[in-house]
Image (cartoon, rainbow, N blue to C red):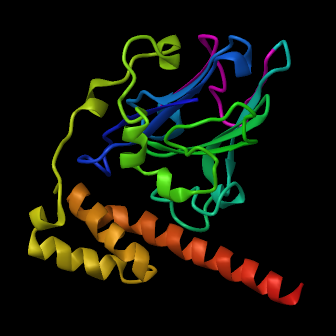
Amino acid sequence: VQGRFGYGKDYPAFSSTVGVAVGGPLLQGHTLYVAYIGPTPGWGGFKVLWDGQEILTEMDAQFSSQDGLMSGKLFSVEPTDYHKYARDTIGTWGETLPSYYFTLPGMNLYVLAGGDTCNVVIEMKKLSGGQDGICGNFNCDVADDGYDALALRGLATPLTGTTLFSSGPAQPEAQTKMRKGAVTLQDCSHELKVKAAESCQAMDEDKEDSCIFDICAAGTTDVAKGEVTADLVSQGVDADMAAKEEHS
């Protein structure tokens, strides 16, 4: 499983997920490619390919490979049905959003299509031979899943040459160019930090600082709506789960 990252409209100074591709022995040599190419905002700007053939080009479309290894669909759904943080930074609470869902050997893949980025949820069992990467190494120790730990294991360097994404359109140049935005909180103007604090105040304290930083990086408070909404949804999910456990 490989991810593609790039700069988007809402986060011009920090990279976001803009695509995901799956291949190798798991798919017996087949390749699934999902990426935002543009220029149309939203799902209309995404390309989905199976072995280079474009699929899922219309809402409510479904596809199954001839060998039965992969089935997929494009539909509108509540993202938190797949993970409580699935809609993080994308969309507002209460609306269903265009999404892709794929069933693969030993894996389920959910992709939420944003304006020019995406959120990805991967469900799979731990591989018997072990696994590692930016999604973690499944050893139940979050302390060794950070960037520094990945760098020590040689997993933080971007892939070069032929990748799973080579089966589809090349990455748009706009995704590779950092644009406006503060790199650190110290670079953020006082006026914007004040507006950011006001916009993020409804969030849990441990996430409020992150929200303020994201606003400074984007140069606008527009990004706060999605983050605050996602956090409130998460709080609601946690409260519901706690209530169920209390009454079980």
> Horizontal and vertical percent for residue 17?
44, 41
Residue 63: which quarter of the image?
Answer: top right
Work out whether 139 lies above or below 106: below
Q: Which corner quadrant holds the C terminus?
A: bottom right
Q: Which corner quadrant holds the N terminus?
A: top right
Whether residue 206 is visible here, answered yes or no, is yes
Q: Is residue 64 magenta?
A: yes
Residue pictured at 39% horizontal, 17% vertical: 170
Residue 156: which quarter of the image?
Answer: top left
- Magenta part of the chain: 46-65
Q: Is residue 180 left or right of residue 28?
A: left
**Closer to the camera in the image, 46 or 212:** 212
Residue pictured at 73% horizontal, 83% vertical: 242
**Closer to the camera in the image, 229 or 184:** 184
> Horizontal and vertical percent for residue 243?
77, 86
Whether residue 116 is visible here, answered yes or no, is no
Residue 223: which quarter of the image?
Answer: bottom left
Q: Is residue 232 left or right of residue 15?
A: right
> Horizontal and vertical percent for residue 65?
79, 17
**Closer to the camera in the image, 81 or 60:** 81
